[in-house]
């Protein structure tokens, strides 16, 4: 049986089910700090400015996309050594949550928690222990 998540060897992971490319590490791993939603946006902008893995179309995942990589069958360890229920193709040692682009009223945004398998709404200005996992859509040009 073919593996759903493929480590590309360039810091990215492809989800063959959803046709999404994920950054293998999260913003916490890359910058050694947690991010509010606006800092997460800045992190994504830096990835695009630096053309990470050859692409300039990195973005925050939607709530549904963030939830799509949650799996109860496999796990890695987060920065606190607790289980993160995502595939081992991703790098261990990251934060346990990701901000999403799914916005809510009163300056809210959805955060998905990979430790617990559920989402919550946080204030985008919250100086909390959150991070972001960058994602992009795979295009036909990427497959050539």
Image (spheres, rainbow, N blue to C red):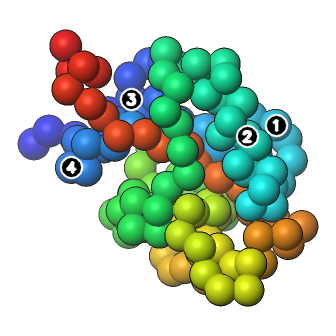
Expressed as whole percent of the image width and height from the top left, the position of residue 143 reads: 21, 21
Question: Which residue has dot 2 on it?
Answer: 43
Mark 1 Cα within 10 Å, few/some/many (few <14, many 20+)?
few
Residue 144 point in image, percent of width and height: 19, 13
In the orientation shown, which residue stands out farthest toward the bottom?
106
Front position in the image: 72 or 130: 130
* Residue to which mark 3 is pinned: 7
User: Which tag, 2 or 1, sits closer to the chain's start?
Assistant: 1
Residue 26 image position (x, y, % from top left) = 64, 44
Q: CA distance from mark 4 to mark 2?
A: 26 Å
Answer whether residue 49 is visible to the viewer in this image: yes
The quarter holding residue 4 reads top left
In this picture, residue 102 sits left or right of residue 68: right
* Quadrant (top left/top right/bottom left/bottom right) for the N terminus: top left
Q: Is residue 90 left or right of residue 83?
A: left
Residue occupied by mark 1: 31
Calculate the distance from the C-alpha at mark 2 to the C-alpha at mark 1: 9 Å
Residue 82 figure quarter: bottom right
**Residue 18 image position (x, y, % from top left):** 25, 50
Residue that carries the numbered disc 4 in the rendered image: 17
Q: Vertically, is 7 above or below 87?
A: above
The span from disc 4 to disc 1 (Cα, nearest Å) is 29 Å
User: Mark 1 or mark 4, which is nearer the start of the sequence?
Assistant: 4
- Whether pointer 2 and pointer 1 mark residues with C-beta atoms closer than 8 Å, the reply is yes
Asked if one can make out residue 11 in the rendered structure from this viewpoint, the answer is no
N-terminal of the pair, mark 3 or mark 1, is 3
Contact (Cβ within 8 Å) of mark 4 with mark 2: no
């Amino acid at each position: 049986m073919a593996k759903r998540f493929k480590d590309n060897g360039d810091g990215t992971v492809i989800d063959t089910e959803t046709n999404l490319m994920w950054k293998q590490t999260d913003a916490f791993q890359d910058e050694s700090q947690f991010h509010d939603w606006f800092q997460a946006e800045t992190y994504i902008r830096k990835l695009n400015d630096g053309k990470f893995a050859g692409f300039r179309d990195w973005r925050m995942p939607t709530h549904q996309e963030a939830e799509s990589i949650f799996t109860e069958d496999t796990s890695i360890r987060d920065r606190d050594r607790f289980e993160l229920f995502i595939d081992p193709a991703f790098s261990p040692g990251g934060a346990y949550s990701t901000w999403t682009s799914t916005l809510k009223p009163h300056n809210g945004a959805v955060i998905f928690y990979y430790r617990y398998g559920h989402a919550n709404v946080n204030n985008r200005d919250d100086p909390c222990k959150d991070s972001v996992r960058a994602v992009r859509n795979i295009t036909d040009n990427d497959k050539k």
